[in-house]
Structures are given as structure tokens and as C-alpha cells.
Image (cartoon, coloured by chain):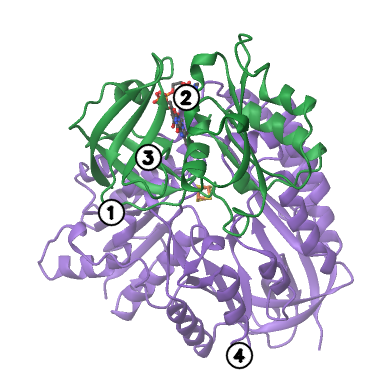
Chain colours: A green, B purple
Amino acid sequence: MRSHKVIEIRNLTPSTYVIKMEKKDFTFKTGQYITLGFSGSIDRREYSIYSSEQDNFLEVLIKEVEGGLVSKKLKRCKPGDYLDIDGPFGHFSLKEDEISKKKFLFIATGTGISPIHSFIATHPNMDYQLLHGVRMKEEAYERESYQNNNYILCTSREKSGDFHGRVTEYLKENPVPSDTVCYLCGNCHMIYEAYDILEKQGINLGPIHTEVYF
Amino acid sequence: MKKVAFKTLGCRLNQYETDAIASQFQNNGFKLVPFDKEADVYVINSCTVTHQSDHKSRNFINQANRKNPDSVLVVTGCMANNAKDELEGRDEINYVVENDQKSSVYSLVEAHYNGEIFHPSKVNSDLFSYGSTDKGFHTRSMIKIQDGCDNFCTFCIIPSVRGRAVSRSIQDVLDNVKSVVANGAKEVVLTGVNIGRYEYKKYKFDDIVEQILDLDGDFRLRISSIEPDGFGDKFLSLLNHPKMTPHLHLCLQSGSEPILLQMRRMYNIKRFKEIVNKVRSVRPDFNITTDIIIGFPNESDQDFESTCNIIKELKFGHVHAFKYSIRKGTRAERMTEQVDEKIKTLRSETLREIADDVKLQYRNQFIGKEQIVLVEKTDGENAKGYGEHYVPVEFKGYELKKNHFYKVKITDINKDIDPVLIGEQVK
Ligand SMILES: Cc1cc2nc3c(=O)[nH]c(=O)nc-3n(C[C@H](O)[C@H](O)[C@H](O)COP(=O)(O)OP(=O)(O)OC[C@H]3O[C@@H](n4cnc5c(N)ncnc54)[C@H](O)[C@@H]3O)c2cc1C
Ligand code: SF4
């Protein structure tokens, strides 16, 4: 476990924020997560790394969960505070030999977009499409990071996105070519349903292609 | 002569570590006595995987203290990591030794008798410096190849108490295997917390298994408990090697896809079935045993039914089922839809019946066939041991010896809860 100093907090919506920390000699593989908590605190949670492998800082994207303990506490952290980081952990990662050769489909709900952001920031020339499932348009976190034609915002509560409905509905209406490499991250129900739809469309998914948050 | 008694709870890795510590005590003149007898030193190698294991560990601490209040009482294992403060606060316990210092239990006790008292955190923390287990309790020689786990399944406390995954050097492992085989070990069992994730320099799990199989000597290799992730198809092809025993304990945990996702397991049902089918396509009688958790948060009747169905479909040779219990600090602790205890109990009963039925069917197929049995207990004419499939066998023969292989013709089965194959030595 190591202590990292907070550099900046970026509030993206009233409940979602990015914590930027010093990186020191920390290394990771894009898609991996860390566990994070205030220095010395026993309350720690897993967070995917939002920044790229080559950035000289570390970032995480966090949504304050209603009734949640750590996501609420971390929202109050300030530049200069110290956070304890453990990791990196996880096997949600790209295969080296596929990155420049394959077409990718990334499917994320809410802050599940975090490791996808890291994938794309680490490999900006990837051929990808990104389906982001949220409730409202304001949750299109830092949309400008993605090439416009590649980012499809699916809003379930209002019609303000590129598609009105859930990502799973989008997938049913827009079948995916079977040679696409798919990665899914976020809510367990979405992953379960999307998995089923994609398998029926002929996509082969392995365990490294899913990351369940809750 | 000083006497030492051990109690081991939990996994095979704990069993291996107890064996190795026991050997150290015996090599230094201690006599090994049963745990319910009076001893000078009691070592409890605890487990904390479920509430029940915590409870049992506490009972054994009390039992040891009652037998000899003046004994040196050492508590090690996962509970020592998980409830360190509580245990260190108990006067009757002399040493609380965390997992990474476990190999130093003997040195601590020796120092104690020499009048030096030092804190366990000051001793050697090499995870693999156990030496060999030649004087342990078993005919099988366990070889620890790995410790710790980084998978963080949402129900599991092990990554917090055993720490990050670390692998032992391949040369060390090979030397260890050679030495136990040279000392007469007939069966080598690979052990660790998550052995499929073995990785040392460029060597993965497949590589270490291949190199062990290529060693000379009259021994057979058993893979203990393994997670269905981490290893590749090369490992599956090694399962046909003549030295490899046709048995895998492949942890499934649930037959429901949504529950596996919530457990954050690293495989899905399709992959699990693929592994089993691949293995059985070469050896249809391959013994696959498994672990199942009953009543994980959110487990619906339908999820449970999926688990029952897969047990019937895959015909597990044995199912080690346990009721889910909350472990502090895990993600599943914070899941809101915990399953009622009564429902868990009912589901356990249903599952046990199915598992017993399937086990009997599995074992029945051996009647009329032959097994190579490694004898663990014998009076010369009657012997008990395990066949290569890890099914218990009792047989009659002539001048039978412990720790020898015998070819046995299976003639019958006794239909107890754990059905034992009955047979006769083939001369
Ligand atoms: C591998 C991994 C990576 C993760 N990466 C991220 C990330 O990049 N960004 C991020 O914001 N979160 C991420 N999470 C979720 C994160 O770890 C915490 O669960 C989340 O921040 C809530 O923690 P808490 O202490 O505030 O709530 P807790 O006190 O733990 O939980 C309060 C209640 O909220 C529920 N709950 C937990 N998580 C969520 C959620 N995400 N949405 C709605 N309800 C929830 C719980 O079941 C519980 O009932 C990740 C989880 C995992 C397993
Ligand atoms: S793989 Fe999962 S269940 Fe097995 S030790 Fe690691 S965290 Fe625990």
C-alpha cells in the first residue's frame, strides 16, 4: 500500500467527480483497478483507473452512491490530502495483438466508462465504438474525450441522448458484426443481458471482457 | 521428550503448512500427539472462510487451554490475520502468528523455551521456507507452489488474509518434488491458494506442471483445488499424461450466470462446461469435484435451480457445499439482498440429496474396473487408500504395505454417505 497526494478534484456533475493524484512510480495495465481509501482508514473500495498508461498522474472517476460510505467520503477530499492506493488488480484488459487489428465495441453503464476511457486514452488510434448507458445527458462524462462519431449516449430517463433507451435495447436494434471484440463494464444486470444478446449475435466473450461493479 | 499437538482447519494449503511445521518439530525431538491429549505445545492453524470456521477455531483454542493451561499455545492461519487484535488480547494464547510468518512457528517456540520472547512479526516472512513434509500426517506429499490471490471474488476473505499472489521459483519447486520423490513419496499434490495463476518469470502453471510430469521416478501427480481460470488448453492436454491422476477439484461456486457475475468470478458457465467436456472427452470417467456456495446474496429459486441442474448435468464426483456466510470487509457483505437462513438450510438439504445421488452414480461406474490404489492404512491383509481418481477404496490382499501402489479390482461399493469402493488386490 502506498500513499499518493491528491492534485485536483474535477466535479463533472453534482454527484460525479474525478480525483487526480500523483502517480509516483505506480505502473498498471490499462483497464485495471486499484483500491482506494483515505490514508490510514480501513474503509477502502475498488476503482478502475481512468487515466492512461502514459499519463504522469493517476485519475479515478467516481460517482457518489446514495447511502454509500466511501464514495461520499472521497468526494470531500481536497488537493494536498493523501490517499492510500493498493494494486493494480484485475484482468479486464486488452490483448496486445488485437489493439491495432480489430474493431472494438465498448459497452458501459455510468462510471463503468472509466476503464474504457483509459483504454482509449492509452491507445488513441483504436478502431472503436462506445455505447454509454446513463439516465440523463449530463452523465455523459467528459464526452469530448471520445471521437464524436464513435460515442453513442443511450439515455434511459430522457430523450436527450443519441439513443433513447437502454444499451441493451440499442444492441437489439443494431446487431454487432461477429468479428467485433466487445468489452462490458458497470452494472451486473446490464452485463448479463448484453452478454446474452451479444452471444446470440455470434460474439465470443471471455471472462476478461467483463468488469462488474455492483 | 516434549509433546506437540496440531489442529488444522480449512484448506489443503493449511494442511500442507501444518504437515511441514510438524516435521520441523519432529526433527527437533518433539513427539506428535493427538490434539485431545495433553501436550506442551498446541498449534492451531485456523481458518476464517466462514463463520463456522471462526467458531470452530475458537472452540479448539478453549479445548487446548483446558487440557493444559501451562502449554505454549500458538494460533496461526487466516483467523490470526483477520482477528489479530482479539486473539492477541487473550491471555491464554502465547503467540498469534500471521500467515506470512507461519513457517517460523517452530523457531518461535524454540526461542520461547530458550527464554527469548520475541514478537512473531520479527521473524522470517518467507512464504515458502517450510522444508519438506516427510514426517507429516499423509502418504501424499504436498508441494506449495504459490500463495495469495488477487482475484477478490466478492464473497471471499482470502485475498485480505493471505495477501497478494506470489509464486515460488520453478527451480525450488522442482528440487522439492525431486527430494520428496527420492525420499519415497508416491503421490505429489500441488497446493496453493490459486495455483492456476502460478507465474514465475516466464513460467506459467502449464509449464510447471509439464516440468514436474517430465521428472523421473515412480510417483503420480495430483492437482488440488483449482479455480477455473488462469490456465490454458495446454494444461488440459497435460491431464492425459500417465503420471497425472484423473481428478480435478474445480471450484464452480454457482450454476447461475448472474450469480457468478455478482461473485466476480473469472469464468462463465459456458467456459466451465467447456473445460469439463474437454477433459471428459478423453477420459469419460475423469473425476471432477467442486465447491458450491448456497444462498449467496440475491440467489433466487431460479438461480438455485440452475446450480442443481448443473450438478446433475456434469455429474460431479463430490460436491463440497457450504452455506454463504458474511465475511467482514468483502463486497458481498454490503449487498442488500441477503438470503434468509431458513431458505439456505432448505436449499442445502435439497442440494445434498442431489449431490449424494450423483456421487453414488459416479462411483458405481468403477465396479468391475481396476484402480491403482495408494495405501494409507493397512494391517497387511486389509487396506484403505485412494485410487487414482481420488475415490476411497478398501480392499483385501496379501502382505499389503502402507505407501505402496496396488492394482485393485473393484467388486462392490458400500453405500454409506461417502460411498467406498470395495475390491481385491490383482496379483
Ligand atoms: C473492480 C471494480 C471497479 C470499480 N470501479 C469504479 C469506478 O471506477 N467508479 C465508481 O464510481 N465505482 C466503481 N466501483 C464501485 C465502487 O467500488 C464502490 O462500490 C462504490 O463507490 C460504492 O461504494 P460506497 O462505499 O460509497 O458504498 P457502500 O457503502 O459500499 O454501499 C452502499 C450501497 O450501495 C450499493 N452500491 C454499491 N456500488 C454501487 C454503485 N456503483 N451504484 C449503485 N449502488 C451501489 C451497495 O450494494 C450498498 O447497498 C468499482 C467496483 C469494482 C468491483
Ligand atoms: S479465486 Fe476467489 S474464491 Fe479463490 S481464493 Fe481467490 S478470491 Fe478467494
Q: Position of residue A158 (x, y in %)?
A: 61, 8
Residue ID for mark 3 = A35
The structure residue drawn at horizontal position 52% and vertical position 31%, both measured from the top left corner, is A112
Disc number for residue A25: 1
For the residues labelled 4 and 1, the Cα–Cα distance comes to 47 Å
Name which residue type carries label 1.
Answer: Asp
- Please identify the quarter of the rendering in which residue B379 is found: bottom right
Residue ID for mark 4 = B217
Residue ID for mark 2 = A141
Q: Is the residue at mark 4 from the same chain as the one at mark 1?
A: no
Q: Secondary structure at mark 1?
A: loop
Name which residue type carries label 3.
Answer: Thr
| Image marks 3 and 4: residues in contact by CB distance under 8 Å | no
Disc number for residue A194: none
| Image marks 1 and 2: residues in contact by CB distance under 8 Å | no
Q: Is the residue at mark 3 from the same chain as the one at mark 1?
A: yes
Answer yes or no: disc 3 within 8 Å of ligand 1.
no
Tell which tag, 1 or 2, sits nearer the viewer.
Answer: 2
Quarter of the picture holding the C terminus of chain B: bottom right
- Please identify the quarter of the rendering in which residue B247 is found: bottom right
Q: Is the residue at mark 3 from the same chain as the one at mark 4?
A: no
For the residues labelled 4 and 2, the Cα–Cα distance comes to 62 Å
For the residues labelled 1 and 2, the Cα–Cα distance comes to 28 Å
Q: Residue furthest left?
A: B115
Residue B260 drawn above or below residue B407:
above
Question: Neighbour class for label 1 at 10 Å: few (<14), some, many (≥20)?
Answer: few
